[in-house]
Each structure stands twice: as C-alpha cells, then as structure tokens.
Image: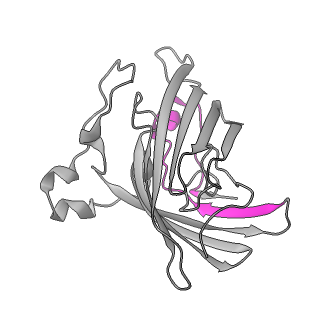
Amino acid sequence: PVCVLAESSLTTFGTPGLIDMPSAESAPDAEFSTTVSYFAGSLRTTLSFQILPRLSGSFRYSGIDGLLTGGGRLYDRSFDLRYRMIEEGKYRPAVAIGLQDFIGTGVYSGEYVVASKHITPAVTVTGGIGWGRLGSFNGFSNPLGGINSSFNTRPIVRQGSLGGIIESAKWFRGDAAFFGGAAWKATKKLTLKAEYSSDGYLREVASGSFLRKSPYNF
C-alpha cells in the first residue's frame, strides 16, 4: 500500500494532513488543490500542487490580525515543499520531510519529519517531530544537537523582513517537539480527525489575537 489520498483531506494550511499538523500522505500525482481556512483572525488561502508522486509544493497568502505595530493585520506570503522519503509498506509507515514557509517572513516557518500508517483502510495514524513553529509548544532540546551544536540555536527572523529569501540557516534548528494524531474516514464524504498540535501560536497569543487553550484539536 502507498499512503496516497484518493480524495485529498487537507489541513488549515492547505497541505495533506490532520487539522493543523502535516502527515506523510500525498495527493494523487499532478493534483491541484485550493483551500481557504479562517479562525481567530487568521485567514489562509493556499494553492497546492503534487509536482511528482513524492514531491509537492504549496503557495500560501495569509492575513493575520494583530501582528503589525498597533495591532494591524499582517499580509504574508509563504511557500512549502514536502518530499515523501519512504513509501508505506505492510508494516512500514510512509515517512515525509517538509519545509513550511521556507521563502517568507518566517511567520509560519517550520520544518518536520513525519510518519503515517494505515491501521485499516479507513484509519490512519500520524506521528512526527517539528522545528520552528512546529516545535514551539512543549519543546525539548534538539536531538540533532548531538551531531553539531549549531542545531541547538535557531537564528532570529530579521526584523522588517519582507521575505523572498531562503534562510536555510534556520532549518531544523532550535527546540523540537512531537505532534501526532489520527484520522478516520467514516464515509466517502466524511473524515473525522483528532490531533495533538506542537504549534504554540506564540506570536498570535502575544498579540492578543488568539487564546490558545489546548494542544488538542478535533
């Protein structure tokens, strides 16, 4: 079996996954999708394309209340790339690696490695580890720090940055955190999801535009 979505179930970021958190699933080859999500002052419009069977890309345009000086709305562009490194097997989960907002202002910037496995044809479980935005809640010391101490610190986003520059020096650096969840395709048109999110929504909470009560989303 291959972890491919027959009918793409997408996140609030417009990518295959749970609710906020990504999964290792992929859309069918060459599929193009567009999504719009809104909650708590955050509007995200995303265009995603399955470039190759294992590689997908996304362009996102977002409006986020309260992030500009004086409480104004920040309009932000971001790009994602995701590559499925390992196909799902009988006992082996699919594994993907992703870069979120890797050419942008850093508002949604994060990286992840995630695994997904079909327990039954209708039930999929997902678990992963995230950095950056996806490592901002209940984080721990970067396990990659044992390879090189430079992975322990994540560079601060440049103030006033307008994006458009690839800041690879941030990738997979700083604290990491676990995330995960499950999805049940109850019918052809209904999927139920539950997740544990590692996104702390730090900037939104600090601005007062969002009250984050729990890491659990349903």
For residue 8, what is the image quadrant?
A: bottom right
The picture places residue 56, in percent across and down from the top left corner, at 53, 48
Q: Can residue 211 be seen in this view?
A: no
Residue drawn at the location 64% of the way across and 49% of the way down: 11
156 displayed left or right of 163: left
Q: In which quarter of the image is residue 113?
A: bottom left
Q: Which residue is drawn at 32% across and 21% down?
A: 159
Determine whether, in the image, residue 46 is placed left or right of residue 164.
right
Q: Position of residue 212 (x, y in %)?
A: 58, 46
Which one is in front, 76 or 3? Answer: 3
Q: Which of 21 and 210 is in front in this view?
A: 21
Q: In which quarter of the image is the C terminus?
A: bottom right
**Would you say residue 208 sits in the magenta stretch?**
yes
Whether the magenta-drawn stretch holds residue 53 is answered as no
Q: Is residue 89 above or below residue 76?
A: below
Magenta stretch bounds: 190-215
The colouring scheme, among rainbow, by chain, secondary structure or one colour, is: one colour
Q: How many marks?
A: 0
Residue 136: x, y in percent?
41, 49
